[in-house]
Amino acid sequence: NPVTDPDATRPERVLSSRRLYEGRILNLRVDTVELPGGGEATREIVEHAEVAATVPLDDDGTVTLVRQYRLAVGQALLEVPAGLVHPGEPLLEAARRELEEETGLRAARLRHLVSFYVSPGFTDERVHLFLAQGLSQGRPQNAPDERIQVVRLPLRQALALVERGDVQDAKSVIGLLLAARETGLIVERRGTD
């Protein structure tokens, strides 16, 4: 019975692993595993560095986002500032670094909102989201291969963009909704079905 399968939470044992690709931001491997209830399966795994992302929120309720073209989806997306965590780099330092590199902003306060796996069926990529407040001007330092447009708008307007489907990046949707809850723009309802 799939609903009560006792093997559903038991670990799979890796029998063999082949590295197919090793890149700058991700690796691809194929694992053959022994299933807990018997039998074998193949798992395609994308290994990805951790990501630190921030929702930069001014005292007046203005949020700073970035717009950049994303080849994988063939369009420019509106996103919260984010980037890879370097090996050995503390998460807070990575969040501060990426915020300043992409937007030119510095945060006096960073508070962890949530960490989540992007799509654990095939990747170990994990995003750590922070609320950035007490903002001041720093110096943007985009990577040579990045073209970023900084977009400032009221958080309420950013939420409307989320609701219309104009913000399609998952970490940004999650971050903006959590920031709105933190500021009281979204009030949790209890007991309604």
Image (cartoon, rainbow, N blue to C red):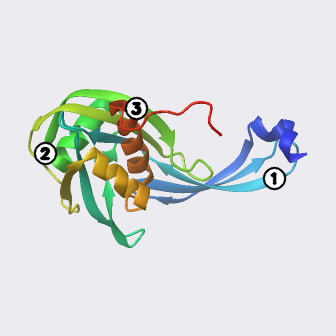
- Say if residue 24 shows up in the picture: no
**N-term mark: 2 or 1:** 1
Q: Give the CA distance from mark 2 to mark 1.
A: 50 Å
Residue drawn 17% across the image and 42% down it:
100
Task: Please state which of residues 121 and 130 is positioned toward the viewer in this rendering.
Answer: 130
Q: Is residue 151 above or below residue 180?
A: below
Point out the tag, 1 or 3, that comes first from the N-terminus: 1
Image spot of residue 167 (x, y percent):
38, 58
SS type, badge 2: loop
> Of 27 and 166, which appears nearest the observer?
166
Circle 3 Cα neighbour tier, 10 Å, few/some/many (<14 / 14–19 / ≥20) = some
Give the left or right position of residue 45, taking residue 159 as reference: right
- The image quarter containing residue 186 is top left
Type of amino acid under label 1 = Glu
Q: Label 3, secondary structure: give it.
A: strand
The correct choice, above or below, for 6 with respect to 28 in the image is above
Q: Quadrant of residue 9?
A: top right
Question: Which mark is on residue 129?
Answer: none
Q: Which residue is mark 3?
A: 113
Where is residue 17? Give x, y as percent: 65, 51
* Separation of marks 1 and 3 at Cα, in angstroms: 38 Å
Q: Which of the two discs, 1 and 3, sits closer to the camera?
A: 3
Can residue 125 be seen from the camera position used here?
Answer: yes
The residue that disc 2 covers is 104
